Image (cartoon, helix red, strand yellow):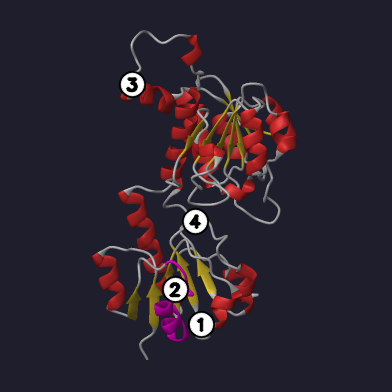
Amino acid sequence: MTKRILVFREINDTQLASLRAEFEVDYLPHLTSFDAPEAMEILPQVHGLVGASLKVTPEVLDKAPNLEAIASISVGYDNYPVDELTRRGILLCNTPDVLTETTADTGFLLIMSTARRAIELAEMVRQGRWTQNIGKEWFGSDIHGKTLGMVGMGRIGAAIARRGALGFNMNVLYSMASSKPELEKSLGAQRLELDALLEQADIVCVTVPLTEQTEKLIGAAQFARMKPGAIFVNVARGKVVDEAAMIQALDDGTLHAAGLDVFETEPLPADSPLARMSNVVALPHIGSATHETRTAMAQRAVDNIRLALDGQPALSAVNVDALER
């Protein structure tokens, strides 16, 4: 029997052809919900899902009794009920490694553009308001030699820390991560409790995954602990931060500036104060949004679903250990 898969995110023609050579493929790259009629019709027959950004709930799984594996085109998997997938014997795969460096580039882009006020100043030029040498009211802050506090020190956190330590001679602190002896040796990084990191860092950068333990990890109390003039950067997940508390901290000057690629609600609502604040650099969740990286992520997902549905070990499975137990 030829197995059937639903692809609900755009992949290239070569990747699609390779899947069609092995499976019956329903290709709905612009699907916005599994409740859509075209998805409802397909789900009862599918053995595999390939895509990203759509919420998979137990109710969705109820509609897909033959589902064996999901290959998410993402490194994060907060859209998937992992425990429920495991209980039902469904393998979940993701795409770590292939987006590490690109997302770290985005993180450091936010550090640089926020500290040097690049977006504000570029807009000044664009609007024709640059009519004389800028005064100190437009000055930014140096990055080199400052203290970078990494909240999370996984693959992406470590890649950002390397850029800071080796490229900009930054002092690196980290928390919310296991001890990293190699990074401590190569980067001079120091592991601290979160409160101590917040008190010492000039720039606080969040890269932890979203879990029950990290939801709203950074709130009013944490912003209050940060140094005067501190910059906050988030390339993790929006819900790791209490967004209302961050807006208040930005508004009252407790927090100097923020560089954000993720938000509690995405796309960012047009009426969000973050869209209007001059001390905020807000990006539309572009952490991995390059041609090269998105192609590599899709290829990893294609490889994962092919292996999983063939009964072979996937390249990057989230819950394989739990399934085996």
Label 4 residue SS: loop
Q: Amino acid at mark 3?
A: Val
Indicate the position of residue 200 as horizontal and vertical percent values. Answer: 68, 25
For the residues marked 4 and 1, what is the alpha-carbon distance in whole angstroms? 23 Å
Q: Main secondary structure of the magenta part?
A: helix
78 above or below 166?
A: below
- Is label 3 or label 2 in front? 3
Report which quarter residue 5 is drawn in.
bottom left
Q: Is residue 48 left or right of residue 322?
A: left
Numbered circle sitting on residue 49: 2
Rendered-image quadrant of the N terminus: bottom left
- Start-end of magenta stretch: 32-46
Q: Amino acid at mark 1?
A: Ala
For the residues marked 4 and 2, what is the alpha-carbon distance in whole angstroms? 16 Å
For the residues marked 3 and 2, what is the alpha-carbon distance in whole angstroms? 47 Å
Numbered circle sitting on residue 125: 3
Q: Residues within 10 Å of mark 3 (few under 14, many from 20)?
A: few
> Is residue 194 in view from this perspective?
no
Check disc 4 and report the residue beneath it.
Answer: 75
Q: Residue at x 58, y 77 (%)?
A: 59
Indicate the position of residue 33 as horizontal and vertical percent values. Answer: 46, 69
Name which of mark 4 and mark 2 comes first in the sequence: 2
Name which of mark 3 and mark 2 comes first in the sequence: 2
Check disc 1 and report the residue beneath it.
Answer: 64
